[in-house]
């Protein structure tokens, strides 16, 4: 699927315009489908009513994980860089990630989650967040990741709207020099949530918590006896994969729905051709998984493509404004995808934080979220 020359690009563009259904069918053929689609495209773009690969059945985690095991089982899938640079990083191969996703999927099943149920995730950027996202997709549950900087009321509004059965959270969140009491915020939110039956809590900060009997469970206890074998649930192409809510800055938050088949094909294709990520490359998208960029280009896009994706728990200015550049050199990052806001904030800190780092591994720079201003765009390679 990766385009490597201008001639290939021009040919792909012409086909996408002249024969869009054939174009996307050819790309979709490269994935694992339990049942092939009856029709590639149906609907009207002008009315925002579009369906893709109608009648097809797949599971996005089959394509993120299982199909890579034969050739890439021992390849690193996820590198996790902790908030505190003195703490140990975590590296998970595709085989290890597959096993942990299956374990988490079985935890969800053991707690009554089945296809179509809604699961809210209010978590720090730890490996368990990506694993939980994939576990939901594995069993056919609809995941709704809620950015862990939102208030209890914002969490309650979104959980109520989604009619979530489970919230997965952590005891606390490490964010720079601060620690945020995530479980306490969940407890407050649940005072006005009626649908949530279970709270699974990851032990992130090592805190002692007030755990409500019958509702709250430590995630590590649930995982102890969970099998690492879990077959993926066949999903219709138009079944819901996830709901992601808008920020609510312009009114009531709106739940935006993404379905399985079209999202899967589009994410893999755009990831591969925007970032040109080769087999041995290390790719880093700095977006939190609580935002759509984090869903698409920190988790699903890279894993669908068999890439190595880096997840970062912290913030760019902790313990100092050199953290991004230190991580790039430490892991040999080749593709770096961040936001203009982050670049502008680091520009304000001056060049001295950049000079100690070579950044020689970088091949592709990307920005997202808003148009990048000229100063930040030109300055990026130098800072």
Image (cartoon, helix red, strand yellow):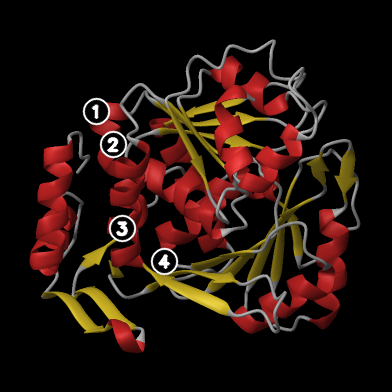
Q: In the rendered view, does 76 fall on the left or right side of 378?
A: left
Give me the residue at 73% from left, 79% from top.
157
Mark earlier in primary sequence (4, 1): 1
Assess disc 4: are there few (<14), some (14-19) or many (≥20) residues with their C-alpha within 10 Å of its C-alpha. many
Report if the CB atoms under discs 2 and 1 are less than 8 Å apart.
Answer: yes
Q: Residue at x 74, y 57 (%)?
A: 148
* Quarter that holds the N terminus: top left
Residue under numbered circle 2: 68
The reply to whether discs 4 and 3 touch (Cβ–Cβ < 8 Å) is no
**In the rendered image, is residue 212 in sight?**
no
* Gap between marks 3 and 2 measured at Cα: 19 Å
Q: Identify which residue, 212 or 174, lies in the foreground.
A: 174
Please rate how many residues cluster around mark 3, counting C-alpha atoms within 10 Å: few if below 14, some from 14 to 19, many from 20. Answer: some
Q: Disc 4, disc 1: CB below 8 Å?
A: no
Point out residue 185 in the picture as x, y percentages from the top left corner. Answer: 85, 63
Q: Is residue 157 above or below residue 111?
A: below
Image coordinates of residue 34 in percent, x first then y, are 18, 61
The answer to the question of whether label 4 and label 2 lie on touching residues, with beta carbons closer than 8 A, is no
What residue do we see at 26% from left, 42% from top?
Answer: 67
Q: Which residue is mark 1?
A: 71
Residue with the mark numbered 4: 140
- The residue pinned by badge 3 equals 266
Give the SS element for disc 4.
Answer: loop
* Residue 53 visible within the image: yes
Q: Is residue 49 above or below residue 41?
A: below
């Amino acid at each position: 699927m990766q385009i490597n020359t201008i001639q290939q690009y021009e040919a792909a563009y012409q086909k996408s315009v002249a024969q869009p259904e054939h174009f996307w069918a050819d790309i979709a053929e490269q994935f694992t489908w339990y049942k092939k689609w009856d029709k590639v495209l149906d609907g009207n773009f002008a009315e925002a009513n579009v369906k893709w690969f109608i009648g097809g059945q797949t599971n996005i985690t089959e394509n993120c994980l299982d199909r890579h095991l034969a050739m890439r089982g021992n390849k690193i899938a996820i590198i996790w860089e902790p908030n505190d640079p003195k703490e140990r990083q975590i590296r998970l191969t595709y085989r290890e990630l597959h096993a942990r996703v299956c374990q988490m999927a079985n935890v969800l099943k053991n707690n009554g989650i089945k296809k179509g149920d809604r699961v809210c995730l209010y978590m720090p950027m730890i490996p368990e967040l990506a694993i939980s996202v994939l576990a939901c997709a594995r069993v056919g549950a609809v995941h709704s990741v809620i950015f862990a900087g939102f208030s209890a009321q914002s969490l309650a509004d979104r959980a109520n709207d989604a009619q979530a059965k489970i919230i997965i959270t952590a005891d606390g969140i490490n964010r720079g020099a601060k620690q945020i009491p995530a479980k306490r915020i969940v407890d407050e939110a649940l005072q006005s949530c009626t649908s949530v039956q279970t709270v699974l809590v990851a032990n992130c900060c090592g805190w002692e918590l007030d755990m409500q009997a019958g509702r709250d469970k430590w995630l590590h206890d649930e995982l102890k006896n969970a099998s690492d074998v879990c077959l993926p649930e066949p999903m219709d192409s138009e079944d819901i994969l996830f709901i992601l809510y808008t920020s609510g800055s312009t009114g009531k938050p709106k739940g935006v729905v993404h379905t399985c088949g079209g999202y899967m094909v589009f994410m893999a294709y755009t990831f591969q051709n925007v970032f040109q990520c080769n087999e041995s490359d290390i790719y880093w998208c700095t977006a939190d998984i609580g935002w759509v960029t984090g869903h698409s280009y920190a988790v699903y896009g890279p894993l669908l493509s068999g890439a190595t994706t880096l997840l970062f728990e912290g913030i760019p200015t902790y313990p100092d404004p050199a953290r991004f550049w230190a991580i790039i050199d430490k892991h040999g990052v080749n593709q770096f995808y961040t936001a203009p806001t982050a670049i502008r904030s680091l520009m304000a800190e001056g060049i001295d934080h950049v000079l100690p780092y070579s950044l020689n591994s970088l091949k592709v720079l990307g920005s997202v979220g808003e148009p990048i201003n000229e100063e930040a765009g030109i300055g990026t390679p130098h800072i």
